[in-house]
């Protein structure tokens, strides 16, 4: 009976984790280029239940009672890398990648984070958010002021006084000449039998950015670039809300199970065990 408390408890912890993931997805439903996340569940290994100190039958050894499972645990998290819908903005410096790939960003940390890094430290990050602009020096940057990288890893300088055209190859054309190429980078992917694609060498850094694990090198992406468009989040608000309802019901079921077991234990200890 006590085992039922732990089984229900692990179920509640698992559902709480799933709810946190769904909540984060909904919070980023309007974030450009955001890829929704998910969580898997795993059962603990089955165990053989033994009755020890059983003196009813000789020889007096532990007697097997059968196979039990102590509950569920949080499994691996995953990212859905499917492409989100594109929204036309007619802004030349809004860009979207059609297919797999990322924009390279020279990201400068603007806040102190004792666990990971310190303020003003610069790293190369990757994102699907192509909401870019020009700074006062005519350099292409993110909305937070971080530099967008060209295909050769440099900064992209544009003359703000000349018309700008950006083609599907990422070439920035001014006055009939290619002045830079917007970088599109990709990484080694794993394809599952069901057709899903995943990156095993990217970590979610935060701020809609990804960072490659040590020893991972980026390669040039062959996906097309569309200027004047932004990729929207691939989160379906309706689907996430439906999933949240299911998670909440599962959580409530486990909670009621704990209440029921607790009531049964109360009866067993305080009523059945009472001496008359």
Image (cartoon, rainbow, N blue to C red):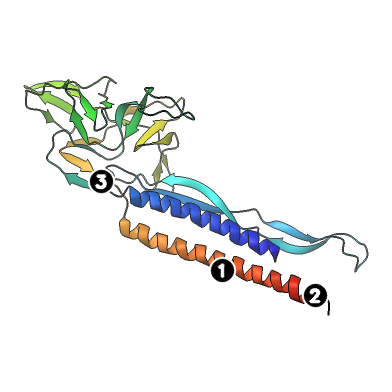
Quadrant occupied by the N terminus: bottom right
Which is closer to the viewer, label 3 or label 1? 1
Residue 148 found in image quarter = top left
| Residue in front for this viewpoint, 247 or 152 | 247
Q: Where is residue 218 in the image (x, y as percent from the top left)?
A: 36, 27
Is residue 64 shown left or right of residue 76?
A: right
Is residue 25 shown left or right of residue 272?
A: left
Q: Position of residue 32 (x, y in %)?
A: 27, 42
* SS of the residue under disc 2: loop
Q: Residue furthest front?
A: 276
Which is closer to the viewer, label 2 or label 1? 2
Q: Of the numbered discs in the image, which one, if any, rests on residue 274?
A: 2
Asked if one can make out residue 170 in the rendered structure from this viewpoint, the answer is no
Q: Mark 3 points at which residue?
A: 232
Mark 2 or mark 1, earlier in chain: 1
Quadrant occupied by the C terminus: bottom right
Residue 238 found in image quarter = bottom left
Residue 190 found in image quarter = top left
Q: Mark 1 points at which residue?
A: 256
* SS of the residue under disc 1: helix
Q: Position of residue 237 (x, y in %)?
A: 31, 56
Q: Residues within 10 Å of mark 1 (few under 14, many from 20)?
A: few
x 29%, y 37%: residue: 128
Q: Are marks 2 and 1 in contact (CB under 8 Å)?
A: no
Alpha carbon distance from label 3 to label 1: 40 Å
Residue 186 drawn above or below residue 156: below
* SS of the residue under disc 3: loop
Q: Where is residue 36 in the image (x, y as percent from the top left)?
A: 36, 48
Which is closer to the viewer, label 3 or label 2? 2
x 47%, y 50%: residue: 39
Q: Residues within 10 Å of mark 2 (few under 14, many from 20)?
A: few
């Amino acid at each position: 009976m006590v085992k039922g408390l732990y089984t229900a408890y692990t179920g509640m912890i698992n559902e709480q984790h799933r709810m946190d993931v769904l909540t984060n997805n909904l919070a980023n439903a309007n974030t450009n280029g955001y890829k929704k996340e998910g969580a898997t569940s795993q059962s603990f290994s089955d165990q053989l239940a033994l009755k020890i100190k059983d003196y009813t039958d000789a020889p007096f050894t532990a007697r097997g009672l059968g196979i039990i499972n102590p509950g569920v645990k949080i499994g691996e998290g995953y990212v859905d890398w499917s492409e989100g819908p594109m929204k036309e903005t007619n802004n030349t410096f809004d860009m979207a990648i059609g297919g797999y790939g990322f924009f390279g960003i020279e990201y400068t940390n603007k806040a102190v984070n004792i666990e990971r890094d310190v303020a003003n430290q610069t790293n190369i990050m990757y994102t699907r958010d192509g909401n870019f602009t020009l700074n006062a020096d005519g350099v292409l940057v993110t909305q937070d002021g971080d530099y967008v990288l060209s295909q050769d890893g440099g900064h992209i300088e544009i003359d703000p006084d000349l018309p700008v055209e950006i083609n599907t190859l990422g070439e920035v054309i001014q006055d009939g000449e290619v002045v830079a190429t917007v970088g599109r980078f990709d990484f080694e992917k794993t394809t599952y039998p069901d057709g899903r694609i995943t990156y095993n060498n990217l970590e979610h850094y935060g701020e809609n950015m990804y960072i490659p694990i040590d020893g991972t090198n980026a390669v040039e992406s062959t996906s097309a670039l569309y200027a004047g468009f932004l990729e929207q989040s691939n989160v379906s608000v309706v689907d996430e809300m439906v999933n949240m309802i299911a998670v909440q019901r599962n959580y409530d079921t486990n909670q009621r199970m704990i209440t029921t077991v607790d009531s049964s234990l109360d009866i067993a200890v305080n009523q059945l065990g009472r001496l008359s």
